[in-house]
DNA sequence: CGTCCTATTGAAATTCTTCAACACTCGTGG
DNA sequence: CCACGAGTGTTGAAGAATTTCAATAGGACG
């Protein structure tokens, strides 16, 4: 059942052998999410987890007056959900059309006990998310608007396509976020994001079609503008 | 040997029974760190980990032009170091006089294999750090200067004393950070931090002695200013 | 007592935001 | 088929929050 799942190779399921996978697949169900579908809300009880198979999931936090911050983006084959906590500390929303493989909490617990490698993979993913979060702390705290936007575009470019090879220096992709969402990620306003995009285009680091389709001729140059 | 270690109860060593602890203690060594001692540098190979027993460790990241961001504070009995990565993604520096219990990488690996509970605790700590990092992303991205400073003071107040009970609504403590370090945490300048401290004092939320000793009469009121 | 480091305060400068107008895209219904 | 409208994106000008520059104050220590 899981053979076709993109999450198979890098995700947690790669830790399972064929028989475990078969057994496990009895408890999972695949789910298609339309854009903007919320499938996990901050402070809600966590009942199940999800492997992102395609699309992009945004993790957000809210201030009570409505100010919003995106605190993470999950690309295939990332795992969504906090194991060691009963309540979610973030809201998870499909930023694009997406498909996920949902797993009940009880199944994942059993899985961890049965296969230490699953636990290791979850831990590794958690560490990777922590690294990402800290890289963004640096960006939000110390980078200028144009550096922030360049960093975000570079980050998305590197993660949007799970099959992308590291050698490729140019890339074309669909932005999974609106200007407003980019702003909510970077602690800016839509207007500022838009202006910086225009500036990057002026620098020849970016070409924009439809305002959503982006061509980056030189990823390293973009990364350079984003600051190390 | 570890009986006196503050890290015993909440930290990872709490997962060990007496005999494991004794065996384990043969590989650890306690180390006193004077203020500003760097004991882990970004991109360096990780050779050993550390349990914070007292004091505060700051985790920082640098941009190549020297701009600095503090991306985490580790209080007793937190664990410092990334298990699932060979190179550190942060620099760890003693923000105050501190003492740590250092553990060679090889010992921790064996420990995890021997006791699943240790792995679980490390995972849980990692998740807690991730939650913290994301809470600060919200703060850096969307809070105003005064909200940032109030949030940081509240955070420090809650964590500085491992023996503090949740019932206490007022607290006096020594700031483990200079104004400049607070600024590096919050993505501000020292001047702005100083001005917001003055403002908070004016609001009666803070009393300041020596500029380092702080009295907070009402933690909830402070938290309120920091935004939810 | 002077020196160094940290912190505070003021005034000018800058970045980013806010407010406002307009353009573009896409789907729906006349 | 075209017009309309809603959502999204761009651009300009004025405003605000924070930074930068500068001067002063307070402590710790030799």
Image (cartoon, coloured by chain):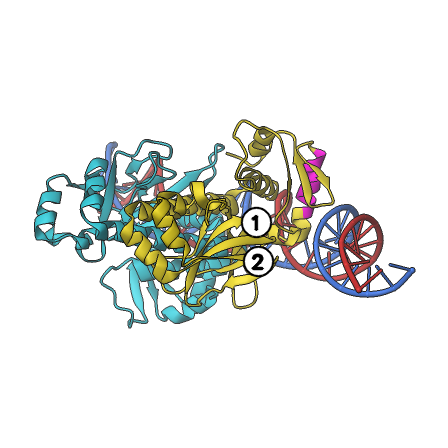
Chain colours: A cyan, B yellow, C blue, D red
Ranked by sequence position, the earlier of labels 1 and 2 is 2
Label 2 element class = strand
**Residue at image point 55% right, 62% down:** B38
* Farthest-out residue, top: B167
Give the magenta-colored segment's residue range. Answer: B194-202
Sort mark 2 into few (<14), some (14-19) or many (20+) by Cα contacts within 10 Å.
many
The reply to whether the C-beta atoms of the residues labelled 1 and 2 are less than 8 Å apart is: yes
Does residue B199 show up magenta in the picture? Answer: yes
What residue is pinned by disc 2? Answer: B33
Residue B102 placement (x, y as % from top left): 46, 57
Does residue A131 show up magenta in the picture? Answer: no
Q: Main secondary structure of the magenta part?
A: helix
Q: In the figure, A59 relative to A142: above or below?
A: above
Q: Is residue B79 left or right of residue A6?
A: right
Label 1 element class = loop
Give the numbered dot on residue B55.
1
């Amino acid at each position: 059942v899981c053979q076709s799942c993109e999450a198979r190779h890098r995700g947690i399921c790669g830790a399972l052998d064929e028989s475990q996978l078969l057994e496990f697949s009895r408890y999972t169900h695949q789910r298609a999410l339309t854009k903007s579908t919320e499938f996990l809300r901050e402070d809600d009880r966590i009942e199940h987890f999800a492997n992102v198979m395609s699309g992009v999931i945004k993790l957000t936090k809210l201030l009570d007056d409505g100010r919003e911050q995106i605190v993470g983006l999950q690309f295939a084959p990332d795992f969504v959900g906090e194991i060691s906590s009963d309540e979610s500390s973030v809201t998870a929303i499909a930023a694009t059309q997406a498909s996920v493989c949902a797993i009940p909490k009880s199944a994942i617990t059993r899985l961890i006990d049965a296969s230490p490698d699953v636990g290791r993979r979850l831990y590794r993913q958690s560490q990777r998310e922590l690294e990402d979060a800290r890289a963004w702390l640096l960006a939000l705290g110390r980078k200028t608007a144009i550096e922030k936007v360049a960093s975000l575009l570079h980050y998305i470019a590197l993660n949007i396509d799970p099959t992308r090879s590291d050698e490729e220096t140019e890339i074309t992709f669909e932005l999974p976020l609106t200007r407003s969402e980019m702003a909510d990620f970077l602690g800016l306003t839509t207007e500022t994001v838009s202006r910086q995009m225009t500036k990057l285009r002026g620098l020849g680091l970016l070409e924009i079609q439809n305002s959503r389709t982006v061509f980056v001729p030189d990823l390293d140059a973009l990364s350079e503008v984003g600051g190390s």
